[in-house]
Amino acid sequence: MEYIYAALVLHESDAEINEENLTNVLDAADAAVEESRVKALVAALEDVDIEEALEGAAFAPAAGAPTAGEEPSVEEQPEAEAEQEEEPEEEEEDEEEASGEGLGELFG
C-alpha cells in the first residue's frame, strides 16, 4: 500500500511518477523498496489518469441514506438491509475498475 501512497504523493506534488522518484519517496519513508514492485507500479500507472481515478473513487452517500446522527425509520431499515445484501458483488467489481483495474493485486 505504501507504493500507492508514494505515487499519490508524487501526483499531488506534480512530480513525475517514475522509478527514481517513487524509490526516493519510499526511501524517505523508511519503507522497504522492491525494484520489481516499483517497476510494476510505474508501468501500471503509465496509462492511468490518476485525477480521474481519484474522482471516481470518491463515493457519495446513497440517496435516502441517513446522515450522521440520523436514525432510519423502522420502515426503511428492512429495505436498506435487502439492498445491501444484493449489491456486494457489483460493488467489488466497480471498486476494482475505479482503483485502476486491480492495481492492488500487483502488490498484495
Image (cartoon, grey):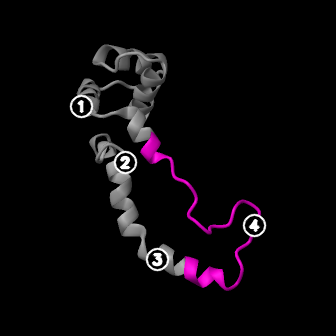
Residue 85 tag number = 3
Disc 2 or disc 1, which is closer to the eye? 2
Instruction: Kindly state the secondary structure of the residue where label 2 is placed.
Output: helix
Q: Tell which of 82 and 1 is nearer to you.
A: 82
Disc 4 or disc 3, which is closer to the eye? 4
Q: Which residue corresponds to the image point at 38% horizontal and 33% vertical from the top-left?
A: 50
**Label 2 CA crowd tier, 10 Å (few <14, some 14–19, many 20+):** some
Residue 98 tag number = 2
The stretch in magenta equals 55-80
Question: Magenta stretch: dominant SS?
Answer: loop
Question: From the viewer's perspective, is residue 44 above or below residue 66?
Answer: above
**Label 1 CA crowd tier, 10 Å (few <14, some 14–19, many 20+):** some
In the image, residue 24 lies at what x, y percent?
39, 14
In the image, residue 65 lies at what x, y percent?
62, 67
Identify the residue under disc 1. 40
Tell me how far mark 3 sits from mark 2, CA to CA: 21 Å
Q: Earlier in the sequence, mark 4 or mark 1?
A: 1
Instruction: Kindly state the secondary structure of the residue where label 1 is placed.
Output: helix
Q: Which quarter of the figure is the C terminus placed in?
A: top left
